[in-house]
Image (cartoon, rainbow, N blue to C red):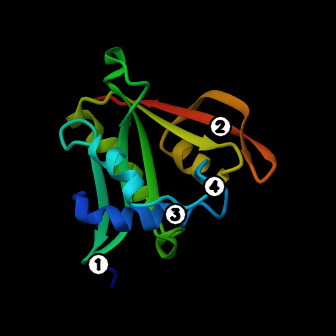
C-alpha cells in the first residue's frame, strides 16, 4: 500500500531537493528553457519571492521523501495582475507517470481561491504533449502560442500558454 502524499510549504532547507528535482528535467528538453543545471545559490532569490499567503511553494512529500514541488508565481509583476498566477509542477523522475502530476494540479487548482488567485496559467512547450494533455484534462484551454520562441539544441520550440479561470 502506497502512503499518501503531503503538500507542505517549502522551507529554505528544502531548496537543495527542489533544485535537484528541477535539474532532472533539463536534459530531456521538454519542461524548462534552462539548458544547464542550476545551482541552489542561484535559486535563493526565486525561493524568497514565494510566500504562503499568495504565492506559495510547496514540496510534495511521501513520508520524509521529497517527490516533487509546486509553485505559484506572479504573472507579469504588475498590480493589476495580482489575481493571476503561473503554476509550475516538477516531479522526481521516479514519481513521474504515476498520477502525482494530476494530484498536484488538482491541489493547486483547489487551493488557488484561498490565495486570491482567479486565473491560473501554465506555460508549456508545444512538444510536451504529456503536460499539455494533463492541463487540458483539468479544463485548461490554449490562450496563446509563441511560435519558435525557444531554441533547444538547435531546434526552435513553441511555447503554449494555457489558462483556466477558477470559480470560488
> Looking at the image, which is closer to me, 4 or 96?
96
Q: Marks 2 and 4, how far apart in space?
A: 16 Å
Q: Nearer the viewer, mark 3 or mark 2?
A: 3
- The quadrant in which the N terminus is found is bottom left
- Using the numbered discs, state the Cα–Cα distance from disc 4 to disc 1 in whole angstroms: 34 Å
Q: Nearer the viewer, residue 41 or 15?
A: 41
Specify the farthest residue to the front: 41
Q: Image point 77% across, 54% down: which residue?
A: 153
Question: Mark 3 = which residue?
Answer: 23
Label 3 Cα neighbours within 10 Å, binned few <14 / some 14-19 / many ≥20: some
Q: Which residue is mark 2?
A: 159
Whether residues under marks 3 and 2 lie with C-beta atoms below 8 angstroms apart, the answer is: no
Mark 1 or mark 2: which is in front?
2
Provide residue 7's location: percent of width, then percent of height. 26, 59
Q: Residue at x 55, y 61 (%)?
A: 37
- Under tag 3, what secondary structure? helix
Q: Earlier in the sequence, mark 2 or mark 4?
A: 4
User: x%, y% of residue 149?
Assistant: 70, 34
Q: Which of the two discs, 4 and 1, labels the residue nearer the N terminus?
A: 1
- Give the camera-side residue of 97 and 55: 55
The residue beneath circle 4 is 35
Choose the circle earlier in sequence order: 3 or 4: 3
Quarter of the image holding residue 86? top left
Q: Name the residue tied to disc 1.
A: 3
Left or right position of 19 against 14: right
Distance between mark 1 and mark 3 Cα atoms: 26 Å
Of pointers 1 and 3, the one earlier in the residue sequence: 1
In terms of secondary structure, where does tag 1 sit?
loop
Label 4 residue SS: loop
Q: Position of residue 74 (x, y in %)?
A: 37, 32
Label 3 or label 2, whichever comes before in sequence order:
3
Residue at point 44%, 47% (across, down) = 88
Amino acid at each position: 500500500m502506497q502512503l499518501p502524499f503531503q503538500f507542505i510549504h517549502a522551507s529554505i532547507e528544502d531548496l537543495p531537493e527542489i533544485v535537484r528535482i528541477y535539474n532532472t528535467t533539463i536534459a530531456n528538453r521538454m519542461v524548462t528553457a534552462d539548458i544547464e543545471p542550476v545551482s541552489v545559490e542561484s535559486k535563493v532569490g526565486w525561493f524568497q519571492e514565494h510566500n504562503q499567503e499568495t504565492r506559495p511553494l510547496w514540496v510534495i512529500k511521501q513520508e520524509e521523501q521529497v517527490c516533487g514541488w509546486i509553485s505559484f508565481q506572479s504573472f507579469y509583476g504588475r498590480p493589476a495582475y495580482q489575481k493571476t498566477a503561473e503554476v509550475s509542477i516538477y516531479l522526481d523522475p521516479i514519481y513521474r507517470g504515476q498520477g502525482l502530476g494530476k494530484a498536484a494540479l488538482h491541489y493547486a487548482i483547489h487551493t488557488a481561491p484561498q490565495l486570491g488567485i482567479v486565473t491560473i496559467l501554465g506555460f508549456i512547450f508545444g512538444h510536451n504533449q504529456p503536460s499539455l494533455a494533463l492541463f487540458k484534462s483539468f479544463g485548461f484551454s490554449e490562450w496563446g502560442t509563441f511560435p519558435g520562441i525557444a531554441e533547444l539544441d538547435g531546434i526552435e520550440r513553441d511555447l503554449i500558454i494555457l489558462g483556466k479561470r477558477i470559480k470560488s
